[in-house]
Image (cartoon, coloured by chain):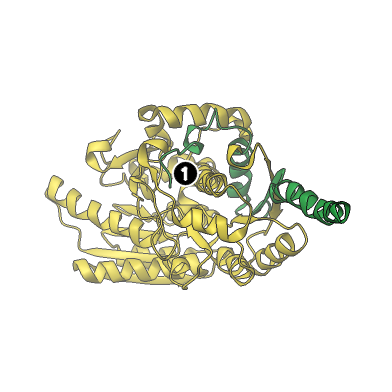
């Protein structure tokens, strides 16, 4: 780090296993025993909530690159910073898409089916979806919270099939997303449009597990692999990532957000020229990274008084031919929207 | 008297010289808390290479320069 006369950065990785109490314990250990100068994490919103409480109490900067529960930046925290969009940003993009797509195609979408898992991520996402549905005049005909990591979601799919909403809007982590796709096929549930809240639906495990059966699924995202070709900086980072990633994967949503969050924190520490917590916090507050220095298609990174990045933008992707492609905003699209999703009986 | 003054000022001088050294860390330690096992371990596993990459030099990571930040 040039700002610290060449000091080296050392990362200590810990595993929270998706458990909020474990995330909290690890945050306490890292701060008190390992003497870390900042924390980064924790993907699951529920874990980010508990781990960042520890950081807040001890006055340690906490960088969150990807948790999307809006409430995380509404706790009045002084030491918490989020580079990624949250579910209100993302869900707004979904409803912008609905508006523009109906206009473009001359169709009408009236009814929504909203399903969401019962951790903080799902609960917050479900609330935002229903709030925006009300705001824009859509009727929610299925409003279903289910237990995360359920072993069966047959009942939930049966309810969706019976109500047959114009758009099904799931919020799931990957095991649930895989189960939903499998049950939909088994029960011949044919949604015309699926608009997912990222997470499980964009995970490579989901894509690998359900393959063609996810055809037509749309999801919000802050990044898309097919946009790498349009951003020289993303191409450079992608080449490096592919050499180190498991299986030589291309950069996608999760690592792209992780990279952006970590770079933002390192930039702040470098500018602070110190590892003193208050100096790092002040540098984070003063962050102003322009969009052309990011791999994301955002306007930049600049935090508001809550610690939320104000330069974020969401996009809509659709699974076509086993890969996600950008379909919205229409001017950035690399594929036309596939609509309606082919019925199971029509698929090869 | 001069000798006493010099002796008294020696620790001060040494302190001043030592201060910048102790205030300038040679290592920046950051804690990363992610799911590395369990149902959603893929996020943590796939994110680990970019974190390692982003700390191992700025040439490959132009975003890290962020010179206009401030």
Instruction: Indicate the quadrant where residue A286 lies.
Output: bottom left
Q: In this view, does A285 lie above or below B67?
A: below
Instruction: Indicate the quadrant where residue A319 lies.
Output: top left
**Chain letter, colour yellow:** A
Can you see residue A162? no
Can you see residue A161? yes
Identify the residue shown where x is 63% and y is 42%. Answer: A4
Instruction: Indicate the quadrant where residue A196 lies.
Output: bottom left
**Considering the image in quadrants, where does the C terminus of chain A appear?**
top left
Residue situated in front as seen by the camera: A335 or A79 = A79
Residue A248 lies left or right of residue B62; in this view the side is: right
Identify the residue shown where x is 62% and y is 48%. Answer: B44
Q: In this view, does B42 lie above or below A180?
A: above
Give coordinates of residue A142: x percent, y percent. 34, 70
Identify the residue shown where x is 56% and y is 63%. Answer: A48
Residue situated in front as seen by the camera: A336 or A120 = A120
Residue situated in front as seen by the camera: A303 or B51 = A303
Q: How many marks?
A: 1
Q: Mark 1 points at which residue?
A: A253
Element under label 1?
helix
Give coordinates of residue A210: x percent, y percent. 50, 44
Q: In this view, does A66 lie above or below B50?
A: below
Callout 1 crowding tier (Cα within 10 Å): few <14, some 14–19, many ≥20:
many
**Considering the image in quadrants, where does the N terminus of chain A appear?**
top right
Residue A84 lies left or right of residue A138; in this view the side is: right
Q: Colour of chain B?
A: green
Chain under callout 1: A
Give coordinates of residue A195: x percent, y percent. 34, 54
């Amino acid at each position: 780090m040039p700002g610290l006369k060449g000091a080296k950065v050392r990362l200590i990785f810990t595993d929270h296993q998706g458990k909020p109490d474990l995330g909290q314990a690890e945050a306490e250990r890292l701060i008190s025993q390992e003497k870390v100068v900042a924390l980064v994490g924790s993907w699951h919103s529920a874990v980010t909530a508990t781990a960042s409480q520890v950081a807040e109490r001890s006055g340690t900067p906490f960088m969150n690159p990807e948790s999307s529960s809006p409430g995380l930046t509404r706790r009045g925290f002084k030491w918490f910073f989020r580079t990624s969009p949250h579910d209100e940003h993302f869900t707004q993009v979904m409803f912008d898409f609905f508006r523009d797509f109906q206009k473009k195609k001359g169709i009408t979408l009236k009814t929504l089916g909203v399903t969401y898992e019962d951790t903080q991520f799902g609960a917050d996402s479900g609330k935002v979806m229903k709030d925006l549905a009300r705001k824009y005049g859509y009727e929610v005909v299925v409003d279903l919270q289910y237990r995360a990591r359920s072993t069966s979601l047959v009942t939930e799919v049966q309810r969706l099939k019976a109500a047959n909403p114009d758009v099904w809007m799931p919020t799931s982590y990957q095991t649930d997303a895989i189960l939903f796709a499998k049950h939909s096929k088994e029960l011949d549930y044919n949604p015309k449009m699926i608009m997912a809240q990222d997470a499980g639906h964009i995970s490579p495990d989901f894509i690998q597990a359900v393959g063609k059966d996810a055809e037509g699924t749309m999801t919000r995202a802050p990044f898309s692999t097919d946009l790498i070709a349009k951003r020289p900086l993303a191409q450079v980072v992608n080449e490096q990532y592919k050499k180190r990633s498991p299986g030589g994967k291309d950069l996608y949503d999760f690592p792209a957000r992780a990279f952006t969050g970590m770079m933002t924190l390192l930039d702040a520490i470098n500018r602070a020229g110190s590892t003193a917590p208050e100096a790092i916090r002040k540098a984070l507050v003063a962050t102003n990274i322009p969009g052309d220095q990011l791999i994301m298609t955002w306007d930049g990174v600049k935090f508001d008084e809550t610690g939320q990045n104000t330069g974020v933008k969401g996009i809509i992707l659709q699974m076509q031919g086993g890969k996600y492609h950008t379909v919205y905003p229409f001017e950035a699209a690399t594929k036309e929207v596939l609509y309606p999703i082919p019925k199971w009986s029509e698929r090869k | 008297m001069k000798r006493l003054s010099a002796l008294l000022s020696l620790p001060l001088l040494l302190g001043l010289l030592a201060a910048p050294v102790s205030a300038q860390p040679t290592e920046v330690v950051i804690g990363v808390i992610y799911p590395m096992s369990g149902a959603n371990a893929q996020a943590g596993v796939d994110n680990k290479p970019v974190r390692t990459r982003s700390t191992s030099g700025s040439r490959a990571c132009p975003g890290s320069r962020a010179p206009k930040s401030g």
